[in-house]
Image (cartoon, grey):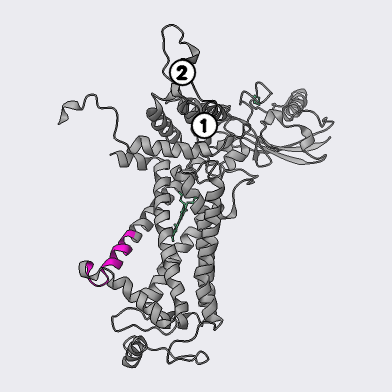
Amino acid sequence: MKYTLHIWRQESPSAKGDFVSYIVDDISPDSSFLEMMDLLNEQLIAKGEDPVTFDSDCREGICGSCSMVIDGRAHGPGHGCTTCEVRMRSFRDGDHIYIEPFRSAAFPLIKDLMVDRSAFDRIIESGGYVTVHSGPKPEPNSLPIPHAVAEHAMDAAECIGCGACVAACPNGAAMLFTSAKISHLGLLPQGEPEHDTRVVGMVHQMEQEGFGACTNHAECQDACPKGISISFISRMNRAFAKATLREPDQRRGTMSNQ
Amino acid sequence: MRLLKFYQSSIGKKIVAAVTGAILFLFLVAHMLGNLKIYSGAEKIDAYSLHLRTFMEGFFGFGGFLWIARVVLLVAVVLHITSVVLLIRQNRQARPIRYRRKRRFATSIAALSMILTGPWILVYIVLHILQFTTGTLQPTPFKETPQGIGAVYFNLWNAFQVWWIAALYVVSMAFICLHLYHGLWSMFQSVGWNNPDRNRNVRLFATISSIALFLGFSSVPVLVWADVVPPPAGQDGTVVVEKVGVESPALVAEGQDSRD
Ligand code: HEM
Ligand code: FES
């Protein structure tokens, strides 16, 4: 199959970028999108040109590295799949395909289609952890968790942190990611001790990074390769309101003030 | 301090927009039910207008209760607009470089047009108050009752004889209800009262309420314009009345007659 690709090329974070068009031919409909990109890069290298820079690692939809906006859709056509899982049969012979990087003020562009998503790591650092018992390993069944609760937490824990929610959101918000990370720990008894500080810390860091605000378009849920539900955003909002407005638990250092 | 921290985050602003939006929605429901009294005749709706001012008069004085409601609504409108403007600014900054190919998959026209229907509502509210509450704008005959408040039935009936005024009201109602179609679902999601078991019902509530509000509100301009609603006493529908000043003693007297 033959395609005309219009790919965003940008030398460096500060350079001016633009679309460059390439024609790729003899592509098997069963090849993956990234294999097609590899073929293009081989051709470019053979011609002595600079290959297109893009992220990828596992190529099986679990690492969350690949990140392209294909024809205006984060990760490209289809539901519940990452860019690496998209097959070329999703396109018609002769199609023009537009490929852009994830666009967000909080994801600075590094080169071509590769963006820096370490803002997500900093959000995790601000509360995405649990207190663990550092002595002998606890008896696993000493903390019973109802099956439904475990499954609910697992639904949130499916998030691979790819950033498609940010790329797809008309406001560049990271609510789906942040709420998934808050919920998968917050729903479990192990995450209970830091429940409130986690919500406040992670939401605060999310805002600091320059992500946008939610206006409930639900584009993130549609683009999420793991099908994470915006109900986690609703849950986060309620938890945030409770945690910020409630009387603080932390009284140390202020007890002698009255 | 806690409130400040809450409001500093976009989630706090969103919840303020949702709560103030809910207050404004409740006002709209009450307003629409009040408007429907036009179908019970001039006496009923003019008495209702007076009642709004004499309600708890002993405690708040004439019009006191109404003023409290107005202040609450004004504060709600100001907070609503301030919050959404701050959110929109944050969102603009969050995507400095736009996509060349932009496509939407999940959202609705109502959600995408909030930023247009909102300001339209604001302009509409101002014009609407100038026309029927203060009487500052009088494109059509306007008169007041002896208590110095607008003669509701007379003013509405005359205004909606003019096709473009009726049309402007219907269009504005369509916009308000489009705003609410998204807003009423959105507010549950924003404050954290939405969940997968409830979502269907919340969507249904938003759809039914916005359509019901649209039908209730726009029935008045449409049915008056279509001559279904009879003209006020002393006026017959086919005659185009010339513009009469508020001070006209004849009309004030007439207004009184129709109430007795
Ligand atoms: C009768 C008056 C109004 C009512 C009943 C109303 C109702 C609502 C409701 C319920 C929401 C959802 C809030 C949330 O989920 O956080 C909302 C959002 C919003 N409103 Fe209003 N509103 C009114 C007037 C206005 C005005 C005058 C503006 C003009 C600036 C405006 C602009 C907006 C915007 C931009 C949003 C955010 C949209 C989004 O979340 O996507 N609204 N409104
Ligand atoms: S490369 Fe790992 S998810 Fe696509």
* Tag in front: 2 or 1: 2
Instruction: Kindly identify which residue carries mark 2.
Output: A143
Observer able to see residue B145? yes
B175 is higher (above) or lower (below) than B11: below
Label 2 residue near ligand 2, CB within 8 Å = no
Observer able to see residue A12? no
Whole-percent x and y of residue A13?
55, 31
B220 is higher (above) or lower (below) than B117: below
Side of B99 relative to B135 (left or right): right
Whole-percent x and y of residue B152?
39, 79
Cα separation between marks 2 and 1: 22 Å
B255 is higher (above) or lower (below) than B28: below
Write down the region rendered in magenta: B60-72
**Relative depth, front residue between A247 and B8:** A247
Instruction: Kindly identify which residue carries mark 1.
Output: A180
**Relative depth, front residue between A190 and A223:** A190
- Quarter of the image for the N terminus of chain A: give it: top right
2 or 1: tag closer to the N-terminus: 2
Whole-percent x and y of residue B249?
31, 92
SS of the residue under disc 1: helix
